[in-house]
Image: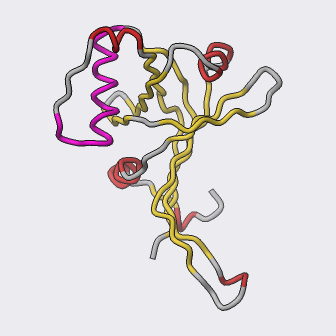
Amino acid sequence: MRRREREVTDSGVIDRIITGCDCCRIALCDGENAPYIVPVSFGYEHTADGCFFYFHGAREGRKLELMARNPNVGFELDSDHRIVRGGRACDYSTHYCSVIGTGRLERVSAYADKLHALDCIMAHYEPGRKWSYDEKAVHATEILRLTVGELSCKAYES
């Protein structure tokens, strides 16, 4: 990281920054070694076993095709954007928080694990609420888990 003074290393602060984000971008690689980036809704958990992101979606599509070829992915989240105006063009700046990293994407197939992932996703957007799910819909929904391998966080705030 070039700007070490902006690096965030406290895991509690990193978790709060992730919790404040509403979109995660996953970067996959297509067969031509070209990037493919997709924005997704997500759930997140940080346990003694590691950090995990959960995503849901259709059971087919480009994201799943690329994941089947290469499950190693990059990810990015950002929030708290604020333009800092200056008197000259070079005096402008942006305050922000961002998280980037790499990990491995995999399908979640066990029903109980899918329910756990859906609970994580729903809790991200509406914490504290208890949810029930239609069993047929759960079986028809693709759930993906991203196991974080590396993660870095940066914040530039006033």
Front position in the image: 142 or 147: 142
Q: Within the image, what quadrant is residue 72 found in? A: top right
Q: Going by the image, does 150 lie left or right of 27?
A: left
Name the dominant secondary structure of the magenta segment.
helix
Residue pictured at 47% horizontal, 23% vertical: 57
Q: What stretch of residues is rendered in magenta? A: 110-129
The residue lying at 70 percent from left, 32 percent from top is 36
Which image quarter is the C terminus in? bottom left
- The image quadrant of residue 137 is top left
Question: Residue 134: percent from the left, percent from the top?
Answer: 26, 15
**In the picture shown, does residue 81 fall above or below 132?**
below
Residue 139, above or below 53: above
Instruction: Please report the residue visible at 56 percent of the width from the left and 79 percent of the height from the top.
Output: 84
Q: Quadrant of the N terminus?
A: bottom right
Would you say residue 62 sits in the magenta stretch?
no
Q: Residue furthest right?
A: 32
Looking at the image, residue 7 sits to the left or right of residue 87; the answer is left
Q: Residue at x 56, y 44 (%)?
A: 76
Task: List x then y, in percent, for residue 19.
Answer: 36, 48
Q: How is the image coloured?
A: secondary structure
Determine if the magenta segment contains residue 115.
yes
In screen coordinates, is 99 left or right of 116?
Answer: right
**Could you tell me residue 121's position as x and y percent?**
34, 33
Q: Is residue 133 above or below residue 51?
A: above
Tally the marks.
0
Most extreme residue toward the bottom is: 87
